[in-house]
Image: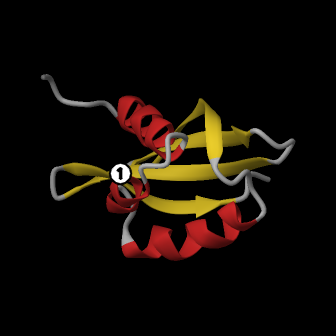
Amino acid sequence: MGEMTAEEFMRSHADKASSGRIAEILGDLTPEAMSQVMPLMADGPNPPTGNTVVPRGRDGDDYVFDVTYTGDSDKVTSMREWVRQVDGAWRIVRLEKPS
């Protein structure tokens, strides 16, 4: 298997989040991102069952994506996520509400 791109990582992460693989998705986050994701997901679909990933370009060394999670209810959560290689592995390093 070749080197995963930032976008492939982000899509894989979003798919894991949408299929309830919580332990795996937490491993994708840095500790800083972990503290940012909980408030963003608090009002979102529980559980999320679908997602949309939109690349937003680069921010220095980071790749930026807008990710929207949907579920069975009409709840929707969108977040902007910064992805960077940390010690040879892709990690989500920052999350916030898209402006």
Q: Which residue extends farthest left? A: 1
The structure residue drawn at horizontal position 56% and vertical position 40%, both measured from the top left corner, is 65
In the depicted structure, whether residue 31 falls above or below residue 72: below
Which residue appears farthest toward the right when viewing the image? 74
Q: Is residue 72 left or right of residue 90?
A: right
**Quarter of image, res 71:** top right
Instruction: Give residue 90's position: percent from left, percent from top.
Output: 29, 48
Position of 75 compared to 51: left or right?
Answer: right
Residue 41: give x, y in percent of width and height.
Answer: 67, 61
Q: Nearer the viewer, residue 53 or 17?
A: 17
Residue 14 x, y percent position in the rendering: 50, 40
Q: Measured along the vertical axis of the image, is residue 68 above or below residue 96?
A: above
Image colouring: secondary structure
What residue do we see at 21% from left, 50% from top?
Answer: 89
Find disc 1 in the rendering and name its residue.
84
Element under disc 1: strand
Reply above or below: 34 against 61.
below
Q: Amino acid at mark 1?
A: Arg
Left or right: 68, with 57 as reference point: right
Q: Position of residue 50 (x, y in %)?
A: 63, 33
Q: Quadrant of the N terminus?
A: top left
Please tell me which residue is depicted at 72% across the width and 58% down the height of the picture. 97
Between residues 51 and 31, which one lies in front from this camera angle?
51
Whether residue 97 is visible: yes
Instruction: Using the rendered image of the protein, determine whether residue 60 is visible from the camera's viewpoint.
Output: no
* Residue count near mark 1 (Cα–Cα under 10 Å), binned few <14, some 14–19, many ≥20: some
Residue drawn where x is 82% and y is 43% of the image: 73
